[in-house]
Amino acid sequence: MKSPFIAVSKSEFILYLREPSAFFFTLIFPLLMMLLFASMWGNDSFPDEEFGYVDFSVPAFMGLVMVTSFVMSFTTSMAAYREKGILKRFRAAPVTPFTILAGQLVAIFVITLAGVILLLIAGVLFYDLKFFGNVFEFVFVFLLSSASIAALGFIPASLAPTARSGAVIANILYFPMIFLSGAALPWFMLPDFLKDISLAFPLTHAIKLMQGVWLGGHFWDYPVHLMVLTGFILAGLFVSVKYFKWE
């Protein structure tokens, strides 16, 4: 007998593929952003460095994939389910909030991986993308970053009563993050007061951590980023478990 978790994951994955806008903004939009900026700045090594713009920025565009899927898509999807009464019907079945959230997240994570793979393929084929770190360490920080961004999405996804309110909340979180975290433009280009504001977002810490490991650092060199991301994971889990609304 198929478990509720597997059933929810499979159905959510199929539904996600049938949603053109979600498919485009998760898989295609970050790729187009990378190709646009790479066409302007190329991937020649920076002065006194071994890496170029694409090498430096691919982890940032991975962050863009994460926030698009885990905040925009996840929040609006759960809010729409709540508004339509789908979650209320789930409540009558042997399905816990954790099963619903986890099933959605597994489906979205698979799509996120697909978006990341597209970035890597394009980077290697067109810009000689280089990796300087340890693969296992990068996988660890990628998973930690994904979990942190997903946990941020947990909060509005657990509380937003309607699809419209979910979309509004998601946009309020999404646009400041992509412009202030380094996902769209390099973080070092921001003025100091915006850099300070950006540190309130988990995406900023996720991108800095992934960039550091990608370019040859070790994850333990970034204790503040690790603590912030872990804190967001715990906060998101707490809110989703304690305050999840079925209707």
Image: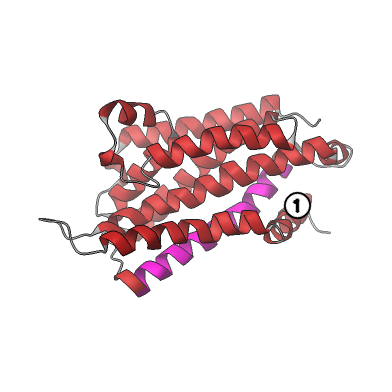
Callout 1 amino acid? Val
Q: Position of residue 61 (x, y in %)?
A: 41, 53
Q: Quadrant of the C terminus?
A: top right
Judge left or right: residue 64 versus residue 13: left
The reply to whether residue 140 is in sight is: no
Camera-nearest residue between 242 and 50:
50
Q: Give the residue at x 41% y 31%.
A: 228
The rendered magenta stretch, by its main secondary structure, is classed as helix
Judge left or right: residue 172 versus residue 57: right
Residue 25 sits in quarter: bottom right
Camera-nearest residue between 77 and 35:
35
Q: Position of residue 145 (x, y in %)?
A: 45, 44
Judge left or right: residue 187 versus residue 10: left
Q: Position of residue 137 (x, y in %)?
A: 35, 53
Judge left or right: residue 180 versus residue 110: left
**Above or below for 140 versus 197:** below
Q: Give the residue at x 38% y 50%.
A: 60
Residue 166 sits in quarter: top right
Magenta region, residue range: 100-125
Within 10 angstroms of label 1, few (less than 14), some, or many (20 or more) residues?
some
Secondary structure under tag 1 reads helix
Q: In which quarter of the image is the N terminus?
A: bottom right
The reply to whether residue 181 is in sight is: yes
Is 244 a magenta residue?
no
**Above or below for 11 versus 141:** below
To which residue does mark 1 refer?
8
Q: Give the residue at x 32% y 64%.
A: 39
Q: How is the image coloured?
A: secondary structure
Count numbered badges in the picture. 1
**Above or below for 151 versus 126:** above
- Name of the residue lying farthest toward the bottom: 125
Q: Position of residue 209 (x, y in %)?
A: 34, 44
